[in-house]
Amino acid sequence: MGEEPITSSYDRPGRHLNFPPDFLWGAATSAYQIEGAWNEDGKGASIWDRFCHTSGRVEGGATGDVACDHYHRYRDDVATMAALGLRAYRFSFAWTRLFPNGDSRPNPAGFDFYRRLIDALREHGIMPVATLYHWDLPQALQDAGGWVNRDTAYRFADYAGRVIEAFGSDVPLWATINEPVLIAFAGHVLGNKAPGTRRFWQVLTIVHHLLLGHGLAVQAFRDIAPRPASDLPEPGIGIVLSVRPSYPATPRPADVRAAQLMDLLTKQLYFAPLFRGHYPPAALTFFRRRLIPLKQQPDDLQIINQPLDFLGLNVYSRALIAARSFNPLISIREVAPTGPTTAMGWEIYPPCLYDVLKLAASYTDIPLYITENGAAFPDQPQPDGTINDQDRIAYLHAHLAEAHRAIADGINLKGYFVWSLLDNFEWEEGYRPRFGLIHVDFKTLQRTWKQSATWYRDVIARNGLRVIGNS
Ligand code: GCO
C-alpha cells in the first residue's frame, strides 16, 4: 500500500466536486458471493458449488455454502443500505435458486426470496439493479457442455425471460451478463474460476455463446416490455463489461504492440460485436492463426448487436503489458506494478477509470454506470473494534474524482456502485480479500461499518466529494 493517500491529478484541495442531481449512488454484490444457503429451499447446484466442493480449487477450502448468509439476513442488510443512503443496490439472481436444474421448472421458494428482497429494497426507496448472470451457471447445464454448447445461450434467454416476467416492473436496470471476458478466460482458459476448464481452443466459441445469450435475453426483454411500477423509471437492459485498460510497460514498440493486442482480446472483442455488430478482424485473424474456431450462424451477430439502454463498466485497475518472446500461444506478459497496490496486488491508478469511460463513450452514447469499483485492503479492526480503512477511502475518493472529471468532460456517466457492500466470497481467493464497506466477521457473521461506509454515506448525502488536502 502506498505511503501517501492516492489522489488523481483532477483532485485539487479546497474544491467540492458536485455530482448531477440524479446521480445513482449504489453498492454491488452478487448472489454466490453473499447469499449462502447453497442448497436450501430447493436451490440447485451451480458450477460454483461444484468448484468450491472440489478439493484444491479455492484458497483454504473456502466455499460459498454460507458466505454472508444474506439469504437469511437480507432484511438487516437492506436496512444497512438504507442507513448508507444508497439510491440503488446491484445484486444478482442465482439461476439455480429460481430454476434448480437449469430447465423450465421453477422453484417457488427461490422466486419468493427475490420477491421479498426486492420488496424490502422498494420499501426503503432503494432502486433494485439486477444482474441475471453473475457466473453461477446451473451445474446441470455445465454437465451438458456449458457455454461451449450453443444451447446454453438459449437456456439463458429462456431463464432471463421468466425472471423479467416475474420482476420486470420492480427492477429498472437489468444487466444480462457480468463480465463475459472473465467467464471465458478465467473460467475456461486459465481455469482459476468455475467451471475451471482449460480449453483455449474453445474460448472464442464460449465468448460467442455468451454474447449470443446476451442478445437473445435482450430480445426477450424487448418482447416482454415490462411496464414500470408507478414510482419507478422505465425498465432498461444492458450488459456489464470488466474493463482493465492495458498500458505498455515501456515505450518500446514491442511493448506497445503487446498492450494493443491485450486490449484487442479483452476489450474490442466485446465492444465491437455488442456496439458495431462485428468482431474485430484482427482478433479473428489472431484466433484463426491459432486454429481456434468460431462457430456462428448467419444471424448471430445481428442478435448480439441489440440496441441497449445502458452499459455497466467494472473498473478496478490497469494492466502494464510487455511483449513476451518465444511463446506461440500469446506473446504478452503482464508486468508487476511499481506503484501502490491493493491487497489483490492490483495497481492503484485512478486515471484508468476516466480512460475506461472515454473508451466506452467512443463506442456508444447510451448511459454508462460504473457497476463495480472498489479495493481490497487488510482492514484490521482496532482494539476498540473500529475499522479505520483510510486506504479504501483514498482509493474511492480518487476514483470518484476521475468519474467527476469524466462527467465534466461530457461523458454520459449516470451512476456508481462500490464493490462491495459487504466483505464477501472473493472466488478462488476465498474470504481473505475484503472489499466491503461493511466488515463481516465470517465466524459470527456480524456486520461492522468501516470508516469508508460512514465516508460513503456522507458522499451520498452531499452528492459529491469534499476535497480537503489529499483526503
Ligand atoms: C468481478 C466480479 C466480482 C469480484 C470483484 C472483485 O469483477 O470479478 O464482478 O464478483 O468479486 O470484481 O474481484
Image (cartoon, rainbow, N blue to C red):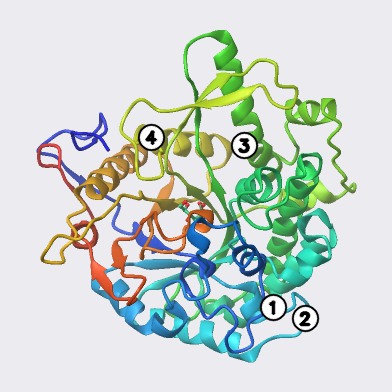
Q: Calculate the distance from the C-alpha at mark 4 to the C-alpha at mark 1.
A: 41 Å
Residue at horizontal 55%, vertical 15%? 255
* Residue hosting label 4: 347
Q: Quadrant of the N terminus?
A: top left
Across the whole image, how many numbered discs are drawn on residues?
Answer: 4
**Above or below, comparing residue 250 to residue 271 in the picture:** above
How many angstroms separate mark 2 from mark 1 (CA)?
9 Å
Residue 263: image x %, image y %? Answer: 59, 30
Disc 3 is placed on an element classified as helix
Q: Nearer the viewer, residue 416 or 38?
A: 38
| Marks 2 & 1, CB-CB < 8 Å contact | yes
Spatial distance from mark 2 to mark 4, Cα to Cα?
44 Å
Amino acid at dot 2: Ser
* Residue 294 picture quarter: top right
In this figure, which residue is indicated by the disc labeled 3? Answer: 266
User: Alpha-carbon neighbours of circle 3 within 10 Å: few (<14), some, or many (≥20)?
Assistant: many
The answer to whether residue 113 is above or below residue 379 is: below
Cα–Cα span, label 2 and label 3? 33 Å
